[in-house]
Amino acid sequence: MDSEEEELVRKVVSGELPVHSLEKSLGDCERAVRVRRSWLQQETQKDLTALPYEGFDYASVLGACAEMVVGYVPLPVGVAGPLLLNGKLLQVPMATVEGTLIASTRRGCKAITESGGAQAVVTQHVMSRAPVLLFPSAVRAAAFKSWAEDPLNRDALCEHFNGTSRFARLKSLRVIVAGKYAYARFCCETGDAMGMNMISKAVNAVLDFVREAHFQDMHILGLSGNVCCDKKPAAINWIEGRGCSVIVEAIIKADIVEQVLKTSVDAVVQLNTAKNLVGSAMAGMSSGGYNAHAANIVAAIFIATGQDPAQVVESASCITLLSHADNGKDLHISCTMPSLEVGTVGGGTHLSPQKACLDLLGVAGASPGKPGEHARQLAMVVASAVMAAELSLLSALVQGHLMRAHMQYNRKDAHANPPPEPSPFRDVVN
């Protein structure tokens, strides 16, 4: 650090230079990070040497992804595949620090692909926002509900909503009333963006119109009243959907179950019923918890592709179902995920590493054809990878392979002290 930067640090420490706006003050993002790091080390008396900062495009973060930046955290990214999904072979990027996760998902991908592949479909693609509104009486709140849900008023609502964006298109509006409170749940199309900012802007425009032209006594308490429902587990998202609602399925041949997954159709079906259905019910599992570890895969792909990791809470809602196929011999597996909140534009998707992972899947940026196509494809990839991982984990649990695999792949001394038995995932990791 040169003498000029040392003087800048002194000014930050003394309060002469605001630490939160160094990028704007200095006009150099990396220099701002260096100065802030030095300030932080003095402030906390902690050494930040192990936290890297060089070689990162901080200009791409400014005003878009993070504030008070002092460095970045590198994460290993692996690929699970090949995964045959809707006739296309894919390698799925996953960022994780959990050993065995990628290897296990890859084993599931192998079983699916060698059995003819997975088929997925998006049944709905909408983002929701539900402001909380206060009226002088319950009767007025109910009057607002009647007015807002009246088909005769839909054109006016759509005009003000859709006029805020090239892609925002109002699909539905449902109002839930609790006394004097009204929660207006707007659902709309958002193209290839996850769409939270887009729908928030559109909802604001509609509320301004409604208050000015029809309900002057309406008070907007908050743009979100928790009926949206964002970054929290909620039955409304499980029932009505949010983001992309995806169903994926595959028929796994009995011999593949035996050769690749090292178990039998009967055994894995029985475990899924006992664990993911009955066990979840006995635990009083919240909506969307009828799966083995969907959040593991959702989080890994979200981090790799620049999604909002906090939305894993609702995006990982999943019910995994296994049964005998119609021929009575093979295995049918499906995962139903009604609230996968993904996008291929906006947020962290524009950062170079995350964009490279999206490009690996052929979904970087906006779809040149039908708006929303890339986002829907990404959602189907996530759901299919979840299904692969569910299949592999359930099989490992049946055979008691789980702990042995973790002992090999989730311990830093694994290579120095290898386990006596081979990993159950050896067919896909060697």
Image (cartoon, rainbow, N blue to C red):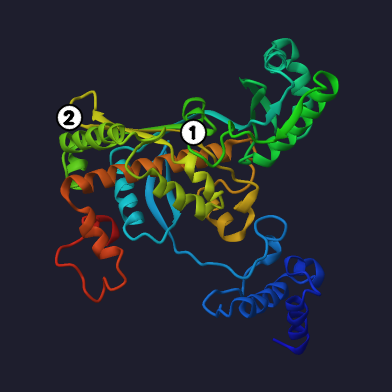
Residue 366 image offset from top left, x and y in percent: 64, 43
Tell me which corner region of the image, top left, top right, bottom left or bottom right, holds residue 167.
top right
On the rendered structure, is 260 left or right of 218? Answer: left
Vertical side of 396 occupied by 166: above or below = above
**Residue drawn 67% across the image and 61% down it:** 67
Q: Nearer the viewer, residue 206 or 323?
A: 206
Tell me the crowding category of disc 1: few under 14, some 14 to 19, or many 20 or more residues within 10 angstroms, Cα based: some
What's the residue type where badge 2 is placed?
Lys
**Residue drawn 73% across the image and 65% down it:** 20
Tell me which corner region of the image, top left, top right, bottom left or bottom right, holds residue 372.
top right
Q: Which residue is mark 1?
A: 234
Q: Nearer the viewer, residue 48 or 397?
A: 48
Residue 390 image offset from top left, x and y in percent: 32, 43
Vertical side of 344 occupied by 323: above or below = above
Numbered badge on residue 380? none
Secondary structure category for the residue under label 1 = loop
Residue 383 image offset from top left, x and y in percent: 43, 39
Farthest residue, direction bottom: 3
Q: Is residue 360 visible?
A: no
Secondary structure category for the residue under label 2 = loop
Q: Which residue is mark 2?
A: 329
Quadrant in which the N terminus is drawn: bottom right
On the rendered structure, is 119 left or right of 369? Answer: left
**Residue drawn 73% across the image and 88% down it:** 2
Distance between the alpha carbons at the discs numbered 2 and 1: 37 Å
On the rendered structure, is 29 left or right of 116? Answer: right
What's the residue type where badge 1 is placed?
Ala
